[in-house]
Each structure stands twice: as structure tokens, then as C-alpha cells.
Amino acid sequence: AKEAGRNAVRFYLPSMNERAVERLALVDAMRHAMSYSEFELYYQPQIALATGEVIGMEALLRWRHPQMGMLRPDRFISLAEETGLIVPLGTWVLRAACAQAAAWHRSGLGELRIAVNLSSRQFNDASLPRLIESVLLETGLPATSLEIELTESLMMENVDAAIATMRELKAMGVQLSIDDFGTGYSSLSYLKRFPVDVLKIDQSFVRDIENDTNSTAMVAAIISLSHDLGLRVIAEGVETEAQLAYLRSRGCDEVQGYLFSRPVPAREFEQMLRDSRLA
Ligand code: C2E
Ligand code: CA
Ligand code: CA
Ligand code: CA
């Protein structure tokens, strides 16, 4: 205080400083979280509309922060990307998700498919195909049971490199899907060049099915586009019976959303599956 008093003019920018300090603290806590296993995967079921059966699940990352409670990825993923922490974290996610899916296969819950989100850093890492190969070998999960979710913007960063990586993954039998489809900037001509298996209709279109004719038209167009290209199509963020009915009427293949289940911890997911099979 004495030091500060000597300066006649001082600029104190609390919001900037506080934000910087908060970021640093979070980065620090993230390093700590890696070694103290505060990260956890939640699972959200994906349902085939034709049969009503759960055919797979998306792994969604959670951080059980000792003071701040359960944090969703929008609180920390971009920071993890900026600091490079996303690489070890993403490797952990991949390994944990594949190990869990393989364990569910072995316990007789069916050949469930596991969808894993990748960040740009991971996807652009030249060693990604080798990493995935070794994780599959280690966990015993068949490559065809792994689906990698990529966003359009991630794929558009370097189109030729992306296509090369995608081809390598496809050659191994790994499934590829475009997440948040319809929100990015890729054109239809690129879509033809990307060797993907699945389009995931972004939840913003699904949400507006009942009250925005543009969104409804988008959903219908994405479903028929997918089928014309020989791709599967999943709608995410399905919350109401009306949305479900519309998706069904348009021949959407799979659905995911709160109408069926929120993302839940592994044990709860397993219980849910066992209960539904017994019923
Ligand atoms: P996303 O891949 O688009 O995942 C869907 C998000 O929508 C998830 O949010 C999910 O919990 C939420 N959701 C699912 N069903 C519904 C619904 O019916 N209504 C509504 N309103 N929301 C629904 P979450 O879990 O907070 O994840 C946010 C984003 O964080 C994900 O968006 C994904 O981009 C990213 N993310 C999650 N896990 C990972 C990960 O392991 N690695 C990377 N790189 N990113 C991840
Ligand atoms: Ca996703
Ligand atoms: Ca999505
Ligand atoms: Ca999203």
C-alpha cells in the first residue's frame, strides 16, 4: 500500500486482472485434476428410431472440481486447448471411453458403439491414428464400435490433411461423424470429399422444429441429404415428443437427447440399460 501510494496515477483494471488470475488458477487446477483423477466421463444414450433400442452412447467429459463442483466442458475445454492440456486429457478420454465400452461388451450389454469428441489439437496431431490403434488394441474394443465426432470447422482447418487422417481412421474400421452439422462453414462439395459415415444434426435446429419453419426445413434437408449420400443421420438435443415425431416422420435414423436421458455416470448408464432390457 505504501508503494502504491507513491504513484500519482495508477490504472487498476480489476476485471482484466481478475480474469487473468482466474484463468491461471484454472489451468493450475486442471494440471492437478489430471493427476488426481477429478475428470469423469458421463454417457448419453443414442437410440435407433426403427427399433427404440439403445445402440450406443456419446462420452461427455465432466470435471469434479473439489471447490467448484461438477464442471461442464464449456467451462474448461477451450482453456485446455489453449494450454495444450487437451492432448493428455483427450488421450485419457479416448482410453477411458474405449475401456468402458469394451467392458460393457464383455458384460453382455450388447455391441454398443461409443462416440468420442475430438478437439482440433488432437485431430491435427500426426500420431492420432497410431494412438487410436493402440487404445483399441489395449482395450480390446473393435474399431467398428468406435465413432469419432469431428466438427466442420476442425475439418476445414486443413482439408487435405483432414481427409488423409480420416482415410487412415476409416481404413482401420473406425466410424466418423460430423458433429453440430449445419452450423459450420463447409460446403456441400467438401462434404462429398470427407469420408464420413454419420451426420449429427445440431441441436439448435432440433430445438426449433416446432416453431421455426427454417429449422424444420433444415432438419428435413439434412436427413434427406444424408440418405442420398448413403450416410446415417443422428438428431441431438431431442427434448419433446413433437420433435421426436417429426424426426420419425422424416426417417431420421437415430436420436439423442433429454427426452430419453441426460448424460449420466457410467454406473447409472449401465443400470438404465439393464432395467430397460429386463422390462
Ligand atoms: P456436443 O458434442 O455438441 O455435445 C452435446 C451437448 O449437448 C452436451 O453438452 C450434452 O450434455 C448436451 N445435450 C444432450 N442432450 C441435450 C438435450 O436434449 N438438450 C440440451 N439442451 N442439451 C443436450 P456438454 O456435455 O456440456 O458438452 C458440451 C460440449 O463440450 C460438447 O458439445 C463437446 O463439443 C464438448 N465436449 C464434451 N466432452 C468432450 C471431450 O471429451 N473432448 C472434447 N474435445 N470436447 C468435449
Ligand atoms: Ca458431440
Ligand atoms: Ca453436437
Ligand atoms: Ca456443440
Image (cartoon, rainbow, N blue to C red):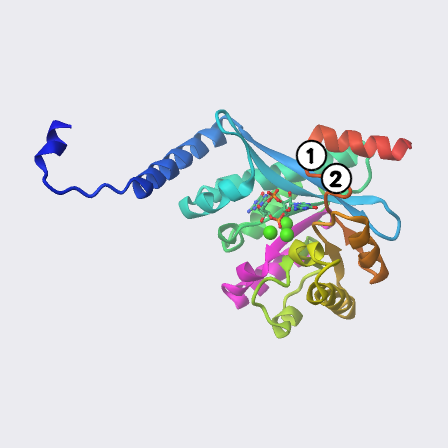
Q: Secondary structure at mark 1?
A: strand
Residue 26 x/y as whole percent = 42, 35
The residue where tag 2 is placed is 261
Looking at the rendered structure, the number of numbered marks drawn on it comes to 2
Q: Nearer the viewer, residue 176 or 233?
A: 233
Image quarter for residue 141? top right
Left-right relation of 103 to 132: right
Label 1 amino acid?
Val
Q: Which residue extends farthest bottom?
A: 189
Q: Is residue 140 visible from the viewing direction of this image?
A: no
Magenta segment boundaries in residue numbering: 144-171
Q: Residue at x 10, y 38 (%)?
A: 7
Residue 59 x/y as whole percent = 65, 41
Residue 267 x/y as whole percent = 72, 28
Cα distance in 3D space between marks 1 and 2: 8 Å
Q: Is residue 262 visible from the viewing direction of this image?
A: yes
Left-right relation of 252 to 212: right
Image quarter for residue 272? top right
Tags 1 and 2 touching, CB below 8 Å: yes
Report if residue 7 lies within the magenta region: no
Q: Which label belongs to residue 264?
A: 1
Q: Which label belongs to residue 6?
A: none
Q: From the image, which quarter does the N terminus lie in?
A: top left
Dominant secondary structure (helix, strand or loop) of the stretch shown in magenta = helix
